Image (spheres, rainbow, N blue to C red):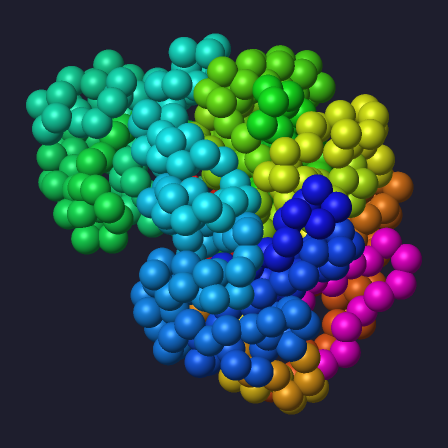
Amino acid sequence: MASGLFRKVLIANRGEIALRVICACRDLGIPTVAVYSEADRNSLPVRFADQAICIGPARSARSYLDIPSIISAAEITNVDAIHPGYGFLSENAGFAEVCRDSGIKFIGPKPEVISSMGIKERARAIMKDYGVPILPGSPGVLSGPEEAEELAEKIGYPIILKASAGGGGRGMRIVNERSELANMLSQAQQEAGASFTSADVYLEKYIGAPRHIEFQLLADEHGNVEILGERECSIQRRHQKLLEESPSPALRPEVRERVSAKLKEAIKAIGYSNAGTVEFLMDEKGDLYFIEVNARIQVEHPVTEAVTGVDLVKAQILIAAGQTLPEILGGPIVPRGHAIECRINAEHPVTFAPSPGRITGLSLPGGIGIRVDTHAYQDGIIPPYYDSLVAKLIAHGRDRTEAIQRMKRALDLFVIEGIHTSIPLHKRILNEQDFVDGNFDTNFIKRWM
Ligand code: ADP
């Protein structure tokens, strides 16, 4: 290993996150290998990685999700580490295990930890054991309608049925009264079985107007854990995040401190390592309740980078190479200012219909306080096969007001022609008085649409 780090890193992903990992590797002087599907042949990660290997056709199942193809590419190029990015194989414990068995370092938590965090009702039970607050709900997987009815009666309606192996905001059912429960349970089980690795479903109390607040953590392989503050991700459409910020305009400092302390203990006890996010819902009283762990880097990580000054992707690589958090962070983390991220998706700003195609005109904003993470380029194509994220626009300011002003200026100077994007929607959000006042929950967008 040159300089005690890795010889070469393969990136098992595409789009902006593949480029993001290439940037971190370049900063560390580590050569990179991009893998790509036929649809991404002309993409920027392919152009900027030191080597690139085609791993299959456009369909992800036969390219970005094809473990044997990715491992072959890693062996041919003689890499000693793989960064999975987010989505695709990033939380696939089987993939992490194959990497380990092939003598390749998976840049993420250990397979056993990924697997226990991926079973959502198990993660819930573990967090509860360490004193992290959870919503009232089933102790484990629901055995059938009788158990569900009994529990729901005790907790009080509405409740939400959730797939144990669920993700991406899918496979959930809100149940308002007893008469709907048995039917909804069988629907949820069927949907879970068809979409995920298991048909198991669990139940928890439904919060009508929650805020989504999540904590970023880093943990090394020597038992050190740091919580790098929170992100507020309540601006969502269809349970998917659209705009994120740090810090949350609503979290009380004493709740932040109490929950961070409990989390730190839990994460250490679980043996979690690398980067991760722990997601919570906040109720009207301002209390937090655990919902799930994302055992990977997240799309919205740049807002945390902006306020903490920590390069999270670089930290992931250094942790995987065996360094300690004190070495990596070099001192206490002092958050500074406020950051906001707008996800610029290739989609219609009103109907949310995907809008893939050729980018015929592009001009990226810049200037003080602005960062753009994107794989878009003039005449580049946004293929229809993958998620619709085209760019992440991040504004950092001394305080929330300055971050909002800078974001508005950057959105005005952001030109993307040839496809529809969410830019007009973001402009509208930033001009809403309730957003400016920090007065919103996860139903914010649904209320106007
Ligand atoms: P996924 O893994 O599919 O993303 P999550 O458990 O993270 O599922 O939930 C996604 C979103 O669904 C949350 O951000 C929130 O908007 C909504 N949600 C989940 N659980 C509840 C709940 N108990 N009450 C209200 N809304 C919920």
Compared with residue 140, is residue 369 higher up or lower down, i.e. above or below?
A: below
Q: Residue at x 64, y 21 (%)?
A: 224
Q: Which stretch is magenta? A: 362-376
In the rendered image, residue 419, in percent from the top left (x then y), is placed at 57, 81
Q: Residue at x 18, y 27 (%)?
A: 142
Q: Is residue 354 left or right of residue 18?
A: left
> Total of numbered circles in the picture?
0
In this rendered view, identify the residue nearer to me: 388 or 158.
Answer: 388
- Give the quadrant of residue 135: top left
Residue 369 in magenta stretch: yes
Q: Can residue 429 be seen here? A: no
Q: Quadrant of ligand 1?
A: top left
Q: Can residue 226 be seen here? A: yes
Q: Is residue 44 left or right of residue 64?
A: right
Q: Residue at x 32, y 65 (%)?
A: 61
In the rendered image, residue 19, in percent from the top left (x then y), is placed at 65, 64
Compared with residue 101, is residue 55 higher up or lower down, i.e. above or below?
A: below
In this rendered view, identify the residue nearer to me: 437 or 140.
Answer: 140
In the rendered image, residue 233, in percent from the top left (x then y), is placed at 58, 42
In the rendered image, residue 130, in percent from the top left (x then y), is placed at 46, 12
Q: Residue at x 63, y 39 (%)?
A: 321
Q: Is residue 211 left or right of residue 90?
A: right
In this rendered view, identify the residue nearer to me: 257 or 56.
Answer: 56
Residue 329 in magenta stretch: no
